[in-house]
Amino acid sequence: MSGPRVPRNSYAIYRAVDRIFEGIISPPQGDYHAVVRYMNEELPRFEQADSSYLILGSYRSEYGRRLREFANCLNMPTNAESIVLGDTINLDTAVVPEFDIKINLLGEAADYVAGVYEKESGGESPELGVVRALFANKTFVFPRDYTGLTRDSLETREDVIQAALVVYYADFDHIESEQRVAEKKKAEIASLLTAAREEGIEITERELTDVIKERQNDLDEPPAEYSWVHLSFFKRFEAMNQCHPWTTTAELRDRADEMPGPERPRWETEFDVGMFRDD
């Protein structure tokens, strides 16, 4: 009978375990068992993959749905595997926080870390801080509606789109009629386009209208807002070319191509449904 199997990335796992128990004197035996259980149940999927991804973000409601759509895009190549941290098994520990076990083991075992962000509240903030400190070089962030740390003027096409979304979702005086509100928004967007042209940014009214309609049909929400801490982290990853903003779910799915790893399957772009039709 052979001995225990040594994980492919054993050195990384040892580093994770050292951090998990760092500073804790004589942790309960049950906490050790929890770490081993998590390793045995969650890490083998990474062992079989050529490229592995840890996915972070908000795991509930519509945020969670978009997060998992993104993870599915990364899973399309047969030799890739992604794990959403919030979908892994729950652990019962006495001293060691469950989050410490999960983020350290999965973060070390994964080839890459991807964080999808849409808001400033919730558990996304501490996760972002941990990966910035421990796994910055292999982490890529995907913040919705992000345009930069400080942006007082229109500099890019994305700035124009975000400004138009702010206008579209702005709360005007409720006493005014819907027609009057629509006229005000139309006038502000027209002024926005004029300012964009003066800055040499090429975008037409039709293109801007199409983007607003797509956003309304896809996720009918105002532009995301972030704390100064979030924005600082995003700016850091932006400087490392590891920050990829998005506006709609379709754009988020496309952003999966920005992650390192195997190419997505050829049939995704080359499949022709017509070849199966009967003429």
Image (spheres, rainbow, N blue to C red):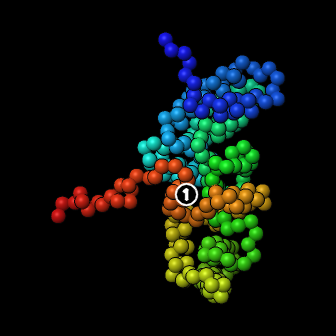
User: Which residue does the image show at 66% across and 27% down from the upper left?
Assistant: 35
Residue 90: percent from left, percent from top? 62, 32
Classed neighbour count for the residue bearing mark 1: other residues with Cα under 10 Å, few (<14), some (14–19), many (≥20)? few
- Asked which quadrant contains residue 189, the reply is bottom right
Q: Estimate the x, y position of residue 204 in percent, counting from the top left.
A: 54, 83
Please say if 39 is above or below 128.
above
State the residue lying farthest toward the top. 1
Q: Residue at x 49, y 35 (%)?
A: 48
Q: Which corner quadrant holds the C terminus?
A: bottom left
Q: Which residue is mark 1?
A: 258
Q: Is residue 3 visible?
A: yes
Q: Nearer the viewer, residue 101 or 90?
A: 101
Residue located at (73% from left, 29% from top): 18
Residue drawn at the location 65% of the way across and 34% of the way down: 12
Res 227 seen here: no
How far across and down, in percent of the image, does residue 52 sit? Answer: 54, 42
In the drawing, does residue 144 fall left or right of residue 206?
A: right
Count of numbered circles on the image: 1
Mark 1 lies on a secondary structure that is: helix
Say if 115 sits above or below 239 in the image. above
Would residue 82 be found to the left or right of residue 10 on screen?
Answer: left
**Amino acid of disc 1:** Glu
Residue 17: % across, % down = 70, 29
Q: Looking at this rendering, what residue extends furthest in the left direction? A: 279
